[in-house]
Amino acid sequence: MMEAIQQPWPWYVAGPLIGLTVPVLLLIGNKSFGISSSLRHVCAACIPCRIPFFQYDWKKELWNLLFVFGIFLGGAITVGLLSNPPGFQVDAELLKELSGYGHVDYDNLVPEAIFSWRSLFTLRGFIIMVAGGFLVGFGTRYAGGCTSGHAIMGLSNLQLPSLVATLFFMVGGFIMANLVLPLILSL
């Protein structure tokens, strides 16, 4: 049993489980699935100034913060107790492609040559971590939600804005992965 839990779960198990959160949240209290809104709730709770965007009763959305904390806790338990002992397995084709950019260190969850304090002060690290983080935050705010909120919750509710947002998320992801990221990795 433990060995089966420690293996990566196939898409046809994990995907439906994630999708089932939508009807469960709707049934237990007409709640919307989404992660990015939790950042707004944290800011509304912690920032005492009178910014109109943060002036609402964030305590009504406390369940969302507990939901995100549960995701964090589940991840911590998984890494601490259920992780696969041999370590990370990276696809052979991806290894070959990344080694072409000089990335051969896979001891951590993310390549240290890209995601580390040392690399933050390089052009490549700044573009990936700072500019990329800004664009993700801007896009989430501009679209009125993140990928999980639009693609999982919005599409299941047949919302046209979520369809448009998801299409642009997908197009942006394909362009980034196939055209822009190779340029950034070669810096």
Image (spheres, rainbow, N blue to C red):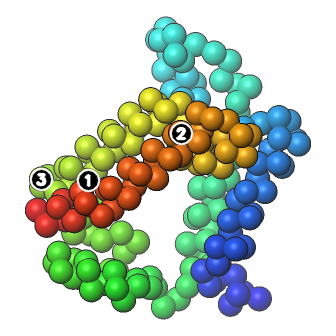
User: Could one spot residue 118 in this view of the protein?
Assistant: no
Tag 3 residue: 123
Verify CB contact (< 8 Å) between mark 2 and mark 3: no
Q: Which residue corresponds to the image point at 70% horizontal and 25% vertical from the top-left?
A: 59
Residue beneath disc 1:
128
Dot 1 and dot 3 residues touching (CB under 8 Å): no
- Judge by depth and name the residue closer to the eye, 166 or 29: 166
Side of 111 where 109 appears, left or right: right
Which residue, given by chain and number where applicable, does mark 2 sit on? 164
Q: Tell me how far mark 1 sits from mark 2, CA to CA.
A: 25 Å
Against 64, residue 86 (above or below) is below
Q: Residue at x 70, y 74 (%)?
A: 12
Q: Amino acid at mark 3?
A: Leu
Q: Earlier in the sequence, mark 2 or mark 3?
A: 3
- Residue nearest the viewer, comparing 59 with 101: 101
Q: Position of residue 142 (x, y in %)?
A: 44, 29
Q: Amino acid at mark 2?
A: Val
Q: Residue 124 falls in which quadrant of the image?
A: bottom left
Q: Alpha carbon of mark 2 to alpha carbon of mark 3: how far?
A: 32 Å
Where is the N terminus found, in terms of image quarters? bottom right
* Disc 1 from disc 3: Cα separation: 9 Å
Question: Which mark is first along the chain, 3 or 1?
Answer: 3
Asked whether, in this view, residue 4 is left or right of residue 137, the answer is right
